Image (spheres, rainbow, N blue to C red):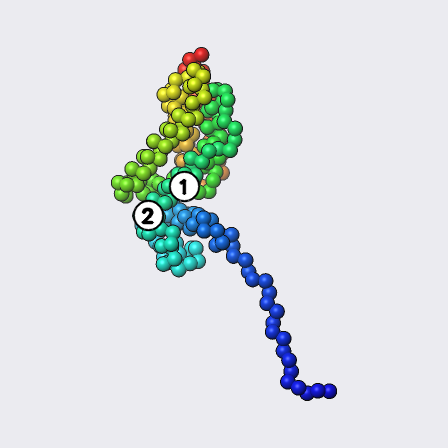
Amino acid sequence: MSRGIPVTCPPVAGPRPRPSPSRADPALRRREVLEAALALMAEHGPAGASLRKLAARLGMQQPSLYHYFTSKDDLIEQLIATFAGDMLVPDPRPLPTQLEDVPAWIRDTVIALYQRPTHPQFVRVMFSVARLKPRYGKLLREIFVERVELAMRMFAKPFVDRGEIDETVAVFTARMTINAIGLKLMEEMVLFDERPLGPDVIAYADYVVDAMREHLVRSRLR
């Protein structure tokens, strides 16, 4: 039997671990960074949400954060633009074709919006930063007044074009419905202790829908 030098085989390399989708896709990774920043700021406020804490939450080095934003001011502006943008993404559901169905459609849209985990966090952050610097308030006004009103005018356009309702009445009614239901949801999901939406909240939202539906019927032009 030969006693030559033993031959050892190199270990067989296993498959390389695949990067997580968020790390492979820059857009997803940026979204992950912004969602972590939003959650941190909702928990600790703008002053307590340090970049050191954000880096630790994401498992990355603090200097790497500057790949996504240049400063904390830039981060806050990106949070406003991104999560307000989510709020204004067109709803995939069919739009109502009957004027009387509009308030119920708005109710369902607003409730669905508040059931996204990021939206109550965004509302908390929005109120905490709005008066910190004039440009934040200006950006929020542009979104919540100008862009939202444009969206409502586009939403009302088929009914206005058919001569069913005055445009200003349609826009004011839509805003009243959004604000009435949105304020109740803000109390329940941002201000008060956390709990599932109770039947009292749904009953209130239904009451708003009935009142706004009656208002639209009375305001109908034909």
Q: Secondary structure at mark 2?
A: helix
Q: Amino acid at mark 2?
A: Asp
- Image x and y of residue 162, in percent: 45, 17
Looking at the image, which is closer to me, 110 or 20? 20
Q: Residue at x 49, y 54 (%)?
A: 24
Q: Using the rendered image of the protein, determine whether residue 180 is visible from the camera's viewpoint.
A: no
- Outermost residue, top side: 222
Q: Please tell me which of labels 2 and 1 falls first in the chain.
A: 2
The foreground one among 27 and 32 is 27
Q: Quadrant of residue 156?
A: top left
Tell me where residue 7 appears, x and y as whole percent.
Answer: 64, 80
Q: Residue furthest left?
A: 134
Check disc 1 and give the amino acid type. Answer: Phe
Q: Residue at x 41, y 48 (%)?
A: 34
- Report the disc number at residue 74: 2
Quarter of the image where one finds residue 79: top left
Name the image quarter holding the N terminus: bottom right
| Nearer-the-camera pick, 196 or 19 | 19
Q: Quadrant of the C terminus?
A: top left
Task: Determine the CA span between mark 2 and mark 1.
Answer: 14 Å
- Crowd class of label 2 (few under 14; some 14 to 19; many from 20; radius 10 Å): few
Question: Which residue is at 41% across, 15% downward?
Answer: 219
Measured along the vertical axis of the image, is residue 187 above or below residue 69? Answer: above
The residue lying at 51 percent from left, 33 percent from top is 92
Left-right relation of 32 to 141: right
Residue placed under numbered mark 1 in the picture:
83
- Asked if one can make out residue 10 in the rendered structure from this viewpoint, the answer is yes
Which element type, helix, strand or loop, lies under badge 1?
Answer: helix
Label of residue 201 in the image = none
**Neighbour class for label 1 at 10 Å: few (<14), some, many (≥20)?**
many
Residue 8 x %, y %: 63, 78
